[in-house]
Image: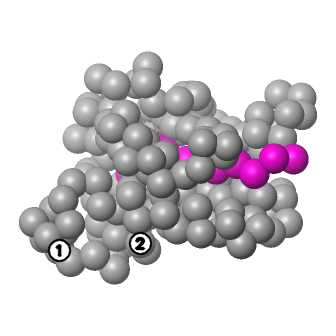
Amino acid sequence: MRPHVIIVNGPPAAGKTSVTAALRLLLPGTVAISGDALRAFAPSDVRTHLAGGATYRAAGALARAYLELGAVRVIFDYLCLRPRHFSYFGEALPASVELKVFTLWPPLETLLERERLAPRPRLTTGAQDAHREMAVHLSAMGEVLQMGAASPAVIAEFIHERCSGGPA
């Protein structure tokens, strides 16, 4: 299998963290980068000091470092509202590395209910605002996965097969 990077994208409460946790178990040695954890390193006024897209660029550089160390798969789990966010990330990757984007897209009602029940406050844009902004760019958001009632494990298996050349 050739080295590749997967972006698991979606609005807040879409299930990115759960899908990523299940996905990383399907290929030994997979590295998973949490965008929320990475963002916590940056100053609150990151755009003033590091310009727009800093978190995406840092994640791309970190993914590249892990690939250079021998990782076959790196997963980045984060909210990408616009196609430009994928470009920021991809600019740090070698041209030989395949970048696959999967956008988790549950119904808005599901997102709002999950957000309401969340035990911790969100670090990013709220579900409704993110859903609205992402909907404008949805055709440029990689492979969009209409979530329905599929479990994170089922979605992870689907993504794994798509990235491994297996049946889907």
What is the x, y in percent for residue 160? 78, 44
Colour mode of the rendering: one colour
Label 2 CA crowd tier, 10 Å (few <14, some 14–19, many 20+): some
Q: Are marks 1 and 2 in contact (CB under 8 Å)?
A: no
Asked whether 13 or 93 is in front, the reply is 93
Q: Residue at x 40, y 41 (%)?
A: 87
Residue 98 seen by the camera: yes
Q: Nearer the viewer, residue 70 or 24?
A: 70
Vertical position of residue 29 compared to residue 99: above or below: below
User: Dividing the picture into quarters, in which one does residue 124 lie?
Assistant: bottom left
**9 in magenta:** yes
- Number of residue marks: 2
For disc 2, the marked residue is 38
Residue at the extreme front of the image, as rendered = 95
Q: Amino acid at mark 2?
A: Leu
Q: Secondary structure at mark 1?
A: loop
**Could one spot residue 119 in this view of the protein?**
no
Task: State which quarter of the image contains the C terminus.
Answer: top right
| Residue interval drawn in magenta | 1-12
* Image position of 5 with respect to 168: above or below: below
Question: Whole-Å distance between the Cαs marked 1 and 2?
Answer: 12 Å
Q: Residue at x 58, y 61 (%)?
A: 64
Q: Residues within 10 Å of mark 1 (few under 14, many from 20)?
A: few
- The answer to whether residue 16 is left or right of residue 122 is right
Residue type at mark 1: give it: Ser
Q: Residue at 49% of width from left, 63% of height from top?
A: 61
Counting from the top left corner in percent of width and height, residue 99 is at: 60, 41
Left or right, residue 108 beside residue 71: left
Q: Pointer 1: what residue?
A: 44
Query: Any magenta on residue 136?
Result: no
